Image (spheres, grey):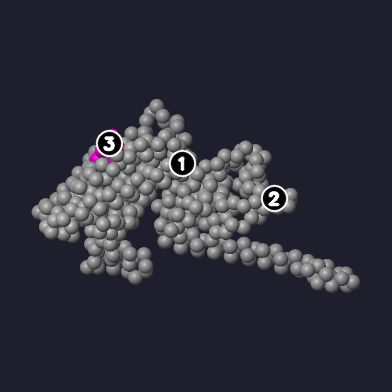
Amino acid sequence: MIIEAYGQTDVGRKRDHNEDYYLIDQDLGLYIVCDGMGGHAAGEVASEHAANAVKRVLVANKKILDEFAQKDVPDSRERVIALVENAVQTACGEIYAMATADSGKAGMGTTLIMMLVVGGKGVMGHVGDSRLYMVRGGQIHQFSDDHSYCTEMIKRGKMTREQARQSPYANVITRAVGIQESVQVDTLLFDILPGDTFLICTDGLHGYTEDPNELAELLDVKEAAGIPQSLIDTANTRGGKDNVTTVILRAVGDAQDKALEDQRAREVNLKLETLKKIPLFRYLTYQELVKVLNITYLETHDADTTIIREGESGEELYIVLSGRVSVSREGQEIVELHPGVHFGEMALVDQSPRSATITAREATRLLVVQRRSFYTLIRKEPVLAVKLLWSFVQVLSRRLRETNEQLSGARNQLSDSARENPFHDVSDFE
């Protein structure tokens, strides 16, 4: 798979200088867009320094990237995500120190949105209100969340999107690189498939392209090289009140590896479609599903293999991706589970012994979520955590109702039996 990349920046129609900066490093697989703030000779310094500081840290730790490219396992994922966070934090500390040392640069800072391509995966690092979008199969997905006052108000239900557009605080951001000595960095790891198109841009563009369907059409064109200029023209035609910067990435399949790439694409889509059907994840957005997918790993089991054993401890949730498994208790089979069904979810919330034995009926592939990874995710993602908690409550509530109905049915049967045989009392069977 080859990544084509094209970038362009423009001062816009209203500003007299450009504080945006973008970086494209094809060899490293690094693509960054920054929107500086702090006025002339400060904002542009912050944006350029941030991008180059991130690059410097990644180059110095390229061994971590190489290890991840060779072996995508939970530990290598954690290391590469931590490296991205560290790179942005390094940039933040350096810009803060520069601003502190020079009164002319007081308040200097920048947004930063980056995409690092490693071994068929993308890693996002994000601070501020610049954005990362992906178009796949004609559908557009926003991977970044704006760190802005209005976005926070919308999340809390204090403001509608229309009110946010009209708010005098629409451009107030709540996080930036360099304003303080450190900053919270949003990260996301995701699969890149042939045909995917990615847009990294500043608010000078996305402020004029709020309709996702329109933006998808602007990005989903055959020749990617002309997209940056087309997007800049769109922003300038609609007002151009800010600097405009766009970087376009297009993943192009390799004809020699087409069979392998097609297989990988089917696998990625199967995992996402399976997660979408799981009741626990029914309320999650595409971006949130990707976050859940990133904490899973794949297990394969031959026929007649015991996956979990009744009475043993465990801390994994399992999702059947393909194959069939049998659920038994005290040696008696209860039910057979097929693809798209999960089991063991209570291990994520308590440490009680397994309540049943699960055995593979045939060759079976499972997506696995460990409790430690699950807790790490929900600590970082409070909105996602609330959605999962609500889903857990609904699943448990449904199971309680089903159990009550079964117990009620059993009690009625015993009552009927007692009436037919007056020599026994119902209490004898309780």
**Labelled disc at residue 328:** 2
Location of residue 349 by image quarter? bottom right
Q: Horizontal placement of 369 versus 406: left or right?
A: left
Which is nearer the N-term, disc 1 or disc 2? 1
Secondary structure type for disc 2: strand
Judging depth in this view, the residue of 305 and 232 nearest the camera is 305
Judging depth in this view, the residue of 329 and 274 nearest the camera is 329
Looking at numbered disc 1 in the image, what kind of residue is underneath it? Val
Circle 2/circle 3 CB separation < 8 Å: no
As displayed, is residue 267 above or below residue 151?
above
**Labelled disc at residue 73:** 1
| 175 drawn magenta | no
Location of residue 247 by image quarter? top left
Most extreme residue toward the left is 16
Judging depth in this view, the residue of 114 and 403 nearest the camera is 114
**Neighbours of disc 1 within 10 Å: few (<14), some (14-19), many (20+):** some
Residue 323 % position (x, y): 60, 42
Q: Horizontal placement of 329 versus 340: left or right?
A: right
Looking at numbered disc 3 in the image, what kind of residue is underneath it? Gln
Disc 3 versus disc 1: nearer the observer:
1
